[in-house]
Amino acid sequence: MRGFFSLDAIFALTLLMVVCSSFLHVYHGRMEGARGIGEGLEARMVGEELAGAINSVYSNGSGMELRLSLPERLASLTLSFDPSAGEVVVERGGRSVRVGTVCNNVEAFLLTSENLRKPLRIYWEENRIRVVSG
C-alpha cells in the first residue's frame, strides 16, 4: 500500500509541475508582449511630440525656436527624418515608428542615443527647419 501511495504522489507532483511550467511559459510570453507594446507606444509618443514641435515651428514662421527634452529612460531611441515622405522615424529595439509632419522642408537628421541626452533644438535656418541636439 505504501509503494502505491508514493507513485500517486509522484504522479500528482509531476502533473502539478507540468501545469505550473505551462502557466509560467504563458505568463512570460504575455509579459514580453506587453513590454513590446509599451515600448512601441513610447516610441510613437516621442515621434508625435517631435512631429508636433516641428509643425509648431513651421507654422509660427522663421523666428520660432523650440526645445524638447526627452526623459532619460527613453534615451535608447534613434530619431531621424525621412524627407521623401515627410516623416519623423523613431527606432527602438529593432522596431520603427513613423509619424508624419505637415512640412517637407525639414533638413534630414539622425540623432542617436548619445545625442538625445541633451534637449533637442528645433529652429529655422536658411528657409529650412533644423533639429539638432543641444
Image (cartoon, helix red, strand yellow):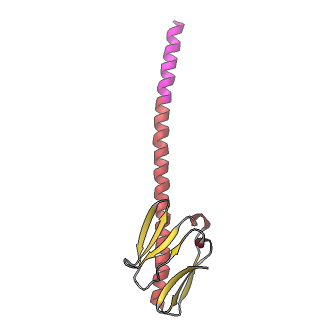
Q: What residue is drawn where x is 50% and y is 54%? A: 35
Q: What residue is drawn where x is 47% and y is 40%? A: 25
Residue located farthest toward the left when viewing the structure as drawn:
85
Residue 98 lies in quadrant: bottom left
Q: Nearer the viewer, residue 18 or 125?
A: 125
Q: Is residue 126 left or right of residue 75?
A: left
Q: Position of residue 70 (x, y in %)?
A: 58, 71
Q: Position of residue 2 (x, y in %)?
A: 54, 8
Count how many numbered circles sit on residues in the image. 0
Q: Position of residue 55 (x, y in %)?
A: 45, 83
Compared with residue 58, is residue 46 higher up or lower down, i.e. above or below? Answer: above
Q: Nearer the viewer, residue 71 or 112?
A: 112
| Magenta stretch secondary structure, dominant | helix
Residue 5 colored magenta? Answer: yes
Residue 59 lies in quadrant: bottom left
Assign the C terminus to one quadrant of the image: bottom right
Residue 34 colored magenta? Answer: no
Q: In the image, which residues are magenta?
A: 1-17
Q: Position of residue 64 (x, y in %)?
A: 53, 90
Compared with residue 127, is residue 68 higher up or lower down, i.e. above or below? Answer: above
Compared with residue 129, is residue 85 higher up or lower down, i.e. above or below? Answer: above
